[in-house]
Each structure stands twice: as C-alpha cells, then as structure tokens.
Amino acid sequence: MNHTSRRAAIQVGITGLLALVMLLAGIAWIKEYRLGQKKKILVARFEEVGNLSEGDPVSVRGVRKGVVREVRLLDQGVRVEFEIDRDVVLHPDAMIRVANIGFMGEKFLALDPGSAPGRYDTSKPIPGRFQSGVPEVISGAGELITQATELSSRLNEFLDAVDPATMERASKNLEKMSSNLSNAVERNQEDLRQAILDFKSAAHQIKTIASTNSDQVTSSIRDFGTASQRLTALSEQLSVTAGSLNRVVSRIDNQQGSLGKAIADSSLYDELKETLRNTNDLVKDIKKNPKRYLKIGIF
C-alpha cells in the first residue's frame, strides 16, 4: 500500500469515527441523556391520559426531570411507566397529572412531589388525574353546538306544527295582557307609591321600637331561654318518672311483689267475696236474733 492509499484510509476512518460520535451525540441529545445522571423508574395510575405517549416529558414543578417510557391500557384505567432523576424526592402526598403544552395540547406529565413528612412508597402506583386541554374543550364545545343545533331544529319543527292563527291569537293576548298590566300600574301608581312609603315607615318604626326597647327584648329573650331550660329539666324529670312507673307496671304484669301477686291471684278475690257474703249473713242474723249475740244484765 503506497503513502496516498494509507492516507486516504486514515481519513476515511477518522471521518467514520467522527460520524459515529456525532450519531451518538445526536441520540443522547434527543433522549436528553446526561452522563453520570442516575434515573429511577416509577409507575402512575390514571383513568384517562388523552394522547399521552412514550417519549413525552415529565416535569417536576416546571423543571424537566424525566420521560415517559410506557403507556399501557388496563381493564380499569391506564398504567404509565416513567423515569425521573434520582435527586427527586417524593413525599407521601405526591400526585401526578397529565397536563398540556401550548395551544395544540401536547401532553406531558406534571409531577407534584408533595410536602408531607416521610417518603412515598414507590412500590405503589402514584395516583394521577387527567387535565383537559384545548382539544378537549373544543370537542366539548362541538358537542354543545350539536345539541344546540338539534334543539333549534326541534323548535322549528314545533313552530311549523303550530297553527299560525293560534300563534297570532296568543301573541295578541300576550300584548293585551301586557297593556292591561301597564294601565293598572299607571292607574294605581299613587296607591303603590303610598304603599311603599307606608311599608318604609312601618319598617322604620319597628327599628325604632327595637332600638328603644333593646334591653327589654334582650331580657325577654334571656327569660325565654331560662324557661326553655326549666322546661327541659321538667321534661327530663317526667321521663324519669315515666320510666319508674313503667318499671312498676312491668313488675305488676310479671306478678312480682305483693301487689302483683295479689292482682294475679284469683283466689284472693274469691276469699274476699266469700268473707263479704258471710259478713252480710251475720249482720242479717244479728238483726233477726239479737238476743243470741247480745246479753244485757241488770244488777
């Protein structure tokens, strides 16, 4: 190999090496790779993520600190895996949301590390929420316009179905009613004005009376409060008395105590009835034969 060929080979090698270095530098710039910067992998859980996709940025209080690695649809929600710098400290109240960049609504993850004492358990997904952007608002406005158009169409159909003569009569009646109301107000304008003045005067008098007798009103309110407290105490005493009576009646019903046994025992009633009958017979016999029971001696 001559000197020229060797020189050309060296130039080609250097050019290829520079191209490889530039390619690696471009990839590192696109991926925002930092030499010596350590990353940690976290997982978030969302109900909806919009158009969030892999490679979208992750910011912490407005500072870009990571990137989305994976977006996976689950049966109940969406699982998002992302990486952030290890110097980001997460607290137990950490939250994350899908936010928007610019007017077109490009998505990114906005991470709030929280401020509560302690550290977040990174084995659990971070709770996330979806923030509507301009496209979602425009979409909602489009639905609203569609509903308004449908309502207008139905209103036109209703007006077409209504008899024009009926609408004309209704319009005339409404105009006549408005005219009558206006005439009534004009005729009674002075009475209305006087009624308003009377109401204003009455309100002023009530205010004056309340100001003049404020001490009496306060005393009456205080007395009413005292009476209410006494009524509450009386109600409590009556409740206690009623409870005691209830217990007494319950003991009687259950044949407990002398009174309960006496009321429940039918033989006592029969014995009392027999005693009264015997007493009655004895009185009758005494009346018929007093000498049998009474002996009077004269000394």
Image (tube, rainbow, N blue to C red):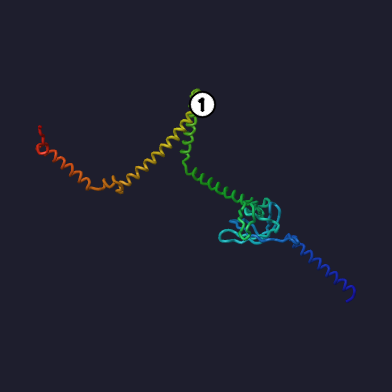
Q: Residues within 10 Å of mark 1 (few under 14, many from 20)?
A: few
Q: Is residue 202 left or right of residue 34?
A: left
State the residue at coordinates (59%, 61%). Answer: 73
The part of the image, by quadrant, that contains residue 285 is top left
Q: Is residue 148 above or below residue 40?
A: above
Estimate the x, y position of residue 265 in percent, counting from the top left: 25, 48
State the residue at coordinates (58%, 58%). Answer: 77
Residue at the right extreme, as displayed? 3
Estimate the x, y position of residue 124 in percent, counting from the top left: 61, 59
Instruction: Count every numbered label the image shows and give the total.
Output: 1
Q: Amino acid at mark 1?
A: Asp
Q: Nearer the viewer, residue 46 or 93?
A: 93
Q: Which part of the image, by quadrant, shows the C terminus? A: top left
Q: Secondary structure at mark 1?
A: helix
Q: Is residue 244 above or below residue 48?
A: above
Estimate the x, y position of residue 34 in percent, counting from the top left: 75, 60
Asked if residue 25 shows in the view, the reply is yes
Asked if residue 186 shows in the view, the reply is no
Q: Nearer the viewer, residue 140 or 55?
A: 55
Residue at the bottom extreme, as displayed? 1
Q: Which part of the image, by quadrant, shows the N terminus? A: bottom right
Q: Nearer the viewer, residue 104 or 131?
A: 131
Estimate the x, y position of residue 122 in percent, counting from the top left: 63, 59
Residue at the front extreme, as displayed? 299
Q: Is residue 15 left or right of residue 164?
A: right
Q: Is residue 119 left or right of residue 280?
A: right
Residue position marked by numbered label 1 in the rendering: 215
